[in-house]
Image: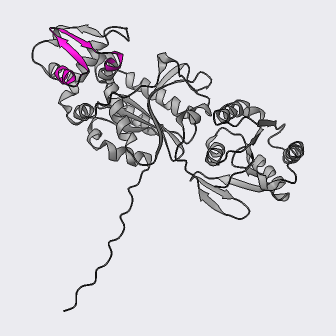
Amino acid sequence: MQSYEVYVCLISAQATPNLVPILNMNPRPKTVLLMVTEAMTKQAAYFQEVLKTQGIHNVHQIALSDSYDLDSIKNQTMDLLDQQNLLDQWDKVAVNITGGTKLMSLATYLVFDGLGGKCFYFTEQNQWIELKSGASEAVVLKKFPIESLLIVQGFRVIHDSKYNTSKPLNKPELTEELVKFQKYSQAISELNYELSQTKSQTQLAYSSDKFTGYSPLMELIDLFVLHGVLSHEGNTIKFLSVDELKFAKGGWFEEHIYSVVKSLPGIQDVAMGMQIDNSTTKQTDGTNELDVVFTYNNRLHVIECKTVNYQSAHNKGEDKKELDRLVALKQSGGSAAKALFASYKKLDSDVRARAKDKNIEIIEQNDLNGLKARLKTWIGIQDPVPAPRPEVDEPTS
């Protein structure tokens, strides 16, 4: 993809069509000009913040007085070009007319095209099209930082040590066994319940009469002991650290899904347990954790991972709350964002129906043995078509 010294774009709620071409240019533009309406002031600020993280500091916002007045937009655009001394430097300028209102796009195109400038459009299929010639090329970033995509939507990734992104314990044999063999299902629910009896998030030792004798729960505890998650003596279990405690509380399920996603081809970036502050958005408030989040094909994908038994009396209705939170996060992530609710347990039919209505994918208990295939289908990853075998001439007798 050709690079340009100056990049002009029209700011709108959907930032990806403006951001991807910039991130794909090497070298990056020296100057970026943002054409902004009053309604898009916040979005422009988010966009400018992302550009700073990419080393682009020469960014100017041009406030448009009326996004539906064709002549006004054309006049303001001409003034912008004159101020930036660009009227005779068209070989250095790329104009992305994908964003903004239809009139903004039309007015900008009429001005730049009339002066001999190059106007581009970025499609939902990631095609970067030069409008006059019709030339196009696919633009899918090899690396699309999750943080950039979150910041441009108004989120702040929390880097405080208290909220560090989770690091996998790297116990694939253990997580695979827990997912593959449903015999641990009830024991996992029992352990979750025992560990939830304290509000402390850092308590490492737990005592209970259930931690003795022979039972499915004790079989699970023995398995955790074998893999170095905890120690067991008498009626007390003790975790080696807070990381192992989080793992036992359901982090193992997040880790399993994270490892499967990470193994898939074409993943641009992936993280587990990412903490974000979304108080600047209107959809949700405060701090949230993204269990598994990744970018693929220039789109944000969020997976909520739960091992909770929502059928039990003390968890009744919690699945609906979790689903509503995921819906809000998906809406805040832009129209192209995708979301999936992964449950180790079976979900109620009304939760599945609500998820379908909100375009949230569901993977639950009976789907887990085919998890990789289900994830590939949801993400849109297609297996490569094998090359046809060459024909071999039959020997003549």
The residue sitting at the bottom extreme is 397
Say which quadrant the N terminus sits in.
bottom right
Say which quadrant the C terminus sits in.
bottom left
The quadrant holding residue 148 is top right
In the displayed structure, does residue 98 sit left or right of residue 359?
right
Q: Is residue 227 magenta?
A: yes
In the displayed structure, does residue 363 sit left or right of residue 216?
right
- Of residues 100 and 177, the one nearer the viewer is 177
The quadrant holding residue 305 is top left
What number of labels is visible? 0
What residue appears at the point 74 percent right and 55 percent down from the top-left corner? 119
The residue sitting at the front extreme is 27
The answer to whether residue 141 of the structure is visible from this angle is: yes
What residue appears at the point 43 percent right and 39 percent down from the top-left corner? 356
Q: How is the image coloured?
A: one colour
- State whether residue 390 is above or below residue 293: below
Q: Position of residue 144 (x, y in %)?
A: 54, 41
Q: Position of residue 175 (x, y in %)?
A: 27, 32
- Of residues 105 and 203, the one nearer the viewer is 203
- Of residues 75 and 389, the one nearer the viewer is 389
Q: Is residue 168 magenta?
A: no
- State whether residue 32 is above or below residue 315: below
- State whether residue 163 is above or below residue 6: above
- Of residues 367 and 357, the one nearer the viewer is 367
Q: Position of residue 125 (x, y in %)?
A: 56, 53
The answer to whether residue 348 of the structure is visible from this angle is: no
What is the magenta range? 220-245
